[in-house]
Amino acid sequence: MPTALLTDIHANREAFDACVEHARRQGATRFVFLGDLVGYGADPGYVVEQVAEHVARGDIAVLGNHDAAVADPDVGMNAYARAAIDWTRDTLDATQKAFLATLPMQAEDGDCLYVHSEASQPAQWHYVQNAGVAERSLNATQKHVTFCGHVHRPQLYHMAPGKPPVCFIPSAGVGIPLSKSRRWLAVLGSVGQPRDDIPSASYAIFDRTRALLSFHRAPYDIEKAANKIKQAGLPAILSARLYIGR
Amino acid sequence: MSKQPLVEGSTLDGFLIGEKLHTGGMATLWRVTRDDIDVPIVMKVPMILDGDDATTIVGFEMEQMILPMLSGQHVPKLFAIGDFARQPYIVMEYIDGESLLPLLDTAPRPVDEVVSIGARVARALSELHRQHVLHLDIKPSNIMIRKSGEAAFIDFGLSRHEMLPDLLAEEFHLPMGTGPYISPEQILRNRTDPRSDIFSLGVLLYHLLTKQRPFGFPRNNRGLRKRLWRDPTPLRAINPDIPPWLQEIVLRCLEIDPANRYPTAAQLAFDLQHPAEVKLSRRAERTRRDSMSVAWRRWWKTVTSDPKPATDMSAQMQQARIVLAAVDLSPGMEILAEQLRVHVRNVLETHPGMRLACVNVLKTARIGMHYPLDESGRNIHVQRLVELKEWARPLGEWAEQVTFHVLEHPDPAAALIEYVRSNHVDHVLIGARASSTLRRYLGSVSSQVVAEAPCTVTVVRVASTNLAHLEHANTPQPEVADT
């Protein structure tokens, strides 16, 4: 049963729809959302409702720092993110906010762990951006595979017993068998705000029965998503960076 | 990690364990059967001893990751993989054939035989590289010759897939390979270059031709590193009967810098299959190794230069592709031939490492093969070759990359398709004659090549405004099935 994993959607409706459609075409039947449904983009209400519907059907979603900042203005972020989240707070209705408030910090699912950022202190929102942080995260769990987001650049760490983890930069569309003799930490790229210099929406599919992980890219209507950000009066950089994936 | 020792007669995941075929340093091989599989299969089980035997485990992991991504006759077909959590194993096709190992005992082998083996192994390597996999342990015991004559590789324990994590590279800080065969860059821990396999194949060919190992059988790191700066004795100094073109090929495989070797295994196979077309350089004539002063300068470079960055395998192979121009030399086809040359020139300009094979098919009678002479007694084959070279004359600046081939065959399309297959051609450029009702019914050479050639095919036509003129020019011509 292939599971699609989407993270850092950031209220980008066009990118979200493109990934869901792409994943269904690849045979994905389950969905997992690794946080940051909102922030930056102009369609927070749509994305929250879509994810809420998935969760109601039994899919899984966890909390991201932007989601947490909707209810808690003290969550630290830069000026652009702050401006976007203040706007988001005013835009979401009470039901949508209530849904975000129900999201857990992390979720376990068989031999997988889902979390938004580094897993040893998930509420600290540390970025898994090098082997040292990856090792801390991997040491915080016994699970075979950890999936996280937050970094906006796809990476795959693997750790053999007694060795430090090693980083691998995956190619899109290639199934990678996740060997049982080591443990894995998949940092997924962002659906709604990719930052690896590739503008297409980034997500992954995990086929648990075959232990096969594929990173994917879904092209989407960037023009439309960017225009909505402009029309909402959000900082110009948030729309401009969508075109270059940075 | 082995939970319980396997014995003949026991079962594992539905496989009935049969006779033990082989016990090696890294794994044991068992003949096994399962009711739903009706071809001979074997189970490979890693020898995992207590204590630190990590390379065996990781090598087996790599093999388990890579084998499912491979297909074709040059690799064993995979049937099942056993989980590390219980009992690791790989069940694969039993390859009925001989490895190349016994041949070493009877070296030197005849030139024709070694060339034939070399071409088959190079073709198999080309197929492996096209599937993004470097073998990185090419040696006689890892190459099987199937009953069909095709070469197949076994043991992917040191291999690397371009798009998968390289578990071995990250975890071990020693060169990985087999002493006599390992390439200079593998010694420097670069596991990203497909030309490493070409180097190892060069060692094998050298050994089969001369009965000597070009770099000996080093047992320590210092001995291994010698090949970073010391070139091997030219083959003809050992056996003068080896033709210069073959020395050219083998020494080119053994170049220290991968950039000086064949850029792809397909290009190596091409030369082995077309000795007359091999471009001879100073390598062909060498009678001794480089002087010690040259060798010392190289040694100094190895100790002072920075490690080279990883090779982008796909980009490198893309640059060095083999392109076939199917040239129609029939009267009335001049404009089309010129148009074809324009497109060929575009491809040459954008791919500096490519090889261009200019091919013309001389249609022969289906029965009664004879060497064709025209009425005035000229050899038509030679005449075609002359015309083909004349066609390519404006491409003179690329002369080093261009070869010429006149194929004699009753069916031009079949001849071209067979040529594409056996030479691992990556791209065909072929002209299509103007359409006519008759041609639509009979099918054209170009449309058959498009349908059946296992590569990219570009069909070149003369722009439509000229078609009327061409149709007219062609009217007196019958449906000559020529290219």
Image (cartoon, rainbow, N blue to C red):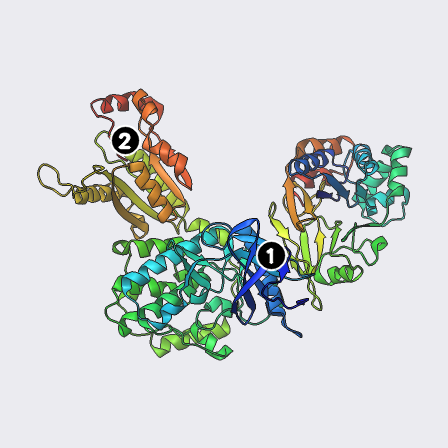
Mark 2 surroundings: few (<14), some (14-19) or many (≥20) residues within 10 A: few
Is residue B171 or residue B440 the one in the foreground? B440
Q: Which x, y percent locates residue A27? A: 66, 38
Left or right: where does residue B436 sit relative to residue B79? left
Q: Which x, y percent locates residue B282? A: 28, 65
Name, please, the residue furthest toward the left: B376
Left or right: where does residue B174 sit relative to residue B301? right
Task: Say above or below: B332 vs B70.
Answer: above
Task: Say above or below: B294 vs B200.
Answer: below
* Quadrant into which the N terminus of chain B falls: bottom right
Q: Amino acid at mark 1?
A: Phe
Q: Quadrant of residue B298?
A: bottom left
Is residue B354 or residue B168 the one in the foreground? B168
Q: Which x, y percent locates residue B169? A: 58, 64
Is residue A161 or residue B196 the one in the foreground? A161
Task: Say above or below: A127 vs A221.
Answer: below
Calculate the distance from the C-alpha at mark 2 to the C-alpha at mark 1. 64 Å
* Quadrant into which the C terminus of chain B falls: top left
Mark 1 surroundings: few (<14), some (14-19) or many (≥20) residues within 10 A: many
Specify whether disc 2 shares its chain with disc 1: yes
Left or right: where does residue A26 sit relative to residue B295? right
| Viewer can see residue B312 | no
Q: Quadrant of residue B437?
A: top left
Residue drawn at point x = 69 percent, y = 31 percent: A224
Q: Mark 2–mark 1 contact, CB under 8 Å?
A: no
Q: Secondary structure at mark 2?
A: helix
| Viewer can see residue A34 | yes
Q: Amino acid at mark 2?
A: Ile
Is residue A26 or residue A52 the one in the foreground? A26
Read off the residue under disc 1.
B15
Read off the residue under disc 2.
B335
Q: Which x, y percent locates residue B308? A: 51, 64
